[in-house]
Image (cartoon, grey):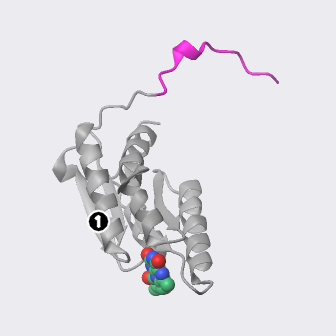
Amino acid sequence: MATALHNLSDYDFNAVPDASNMIFGIVVAEWNPEITGTLLEGCVATLEKHGALTENIHVKTVPGSFELIYGAHQMTLNDGYDAVIVLGSVIRGETPHFDYICEGVTAGIARLNATSNIPVIYGLLTTNDLQQAKDRAGGKFGNKGDECAVVAIKMAKF
Ligand code: DLZ
């Protein structure tokens, strides 16, 4: 059955809700720290820009991106969070390890989104080389950490 047609002007796609009453968990991977550190800085700064209180942004580190799944799952079990954000950087190497990690993390986070009561935001950079990662972590293509913060706020309000 066709859905009712709404006016586009009913929606403001650019509006970001106020985050001052929201609590966020961030899980960040220690692999490629130059990249994940910058993702984290951007993410926290953007959450705060939209009103989140510093004490309501809880950061935990995990050794590598594969552990983001476990870390995020633990945070979803904690009643207090409005959204969880995972931040990692996987850089293609000489072995198929890259594909296994990317596919594993992607499937794991997708599954958490389908089974948890809160959204889990996917901030995993998957790049062929370090320069591509830098371009997306505060470089010419912006900072994926900033984007994840805005997505987390919007999804927390969903
Ligand atoms: C093993 C591994 C490799 C080869 N590359 C990366 C990477 O580019 N980025 C990342 O975050 N983690 C990497 N890891 C570590 C795995 O994510 C994981 O920590 C280990 O396989 C142990 O479970």
Quadrant housing the N terminus:
top right
Asked if the residue at label 1 sits under 8 Å from ligand 1, the reply is: no
- Asked if 135 appears above or below 52 in the picture, the reply is below
Q: Does the image show residue 117?
A: yes
Q: Mark 1 — residue?
A: 37
Three-letter amino acid code at disc 1?
Gly
Crowding at mark 1 (Cα within 10 Å: few <14, some 14-19, many 20+)? some
Residue at 53%, 15% (x, y): give it.
10
Q: Is residue 155 left or right of residue 28?
A: right
Q: Residue 73 versus residue 38: which sits nearer the camera?
A: 38
Residue at 30%, 32% (x, y): give it.
18
Q: Residue 135 versus residue 155: which sits nearer the camera?
A: 135
Residue at 34%, 59% (x, y): give it.
39
- Asked if 85 appears above or below 31 in the picture, the reply is above
Q: Quadrant of residue 155?
A: top left
- Asked if 62 appears above or below 148 in the picture, the reply is below
Location of residue 158 in the rendering, given as x and y in whole percent from the top left corner: 47, 36
Location of residue 98 in the rendering, given as x and y in whole percent from the top left corner: 57, 78
Q: Does the image show residue 20?
A: no
Residue at 40%, 27% (x, y): give it.
15
Residue range (magenta): 1-13
Location of residue 109 in the rendering, given as x and y in whole percent from the top left corner: 53, 63
Mark 1 lies on a secondary structure that is helix
Looking at the image, the residue that sits furthest to the right is 1
Would you say residue 73 sits in the magenta stretch?
no
Q: Residue 78 versus residue 15: which sits nearer the camera?
A: 15
Q: Is residue 81 left or right of residue 5?
A: left
Location of residue 91 in the rendering, given as x and y in whole percent from the top left corner: 49, 74
- Asked if 53 appears above or below 6 in the picture, the reply is below
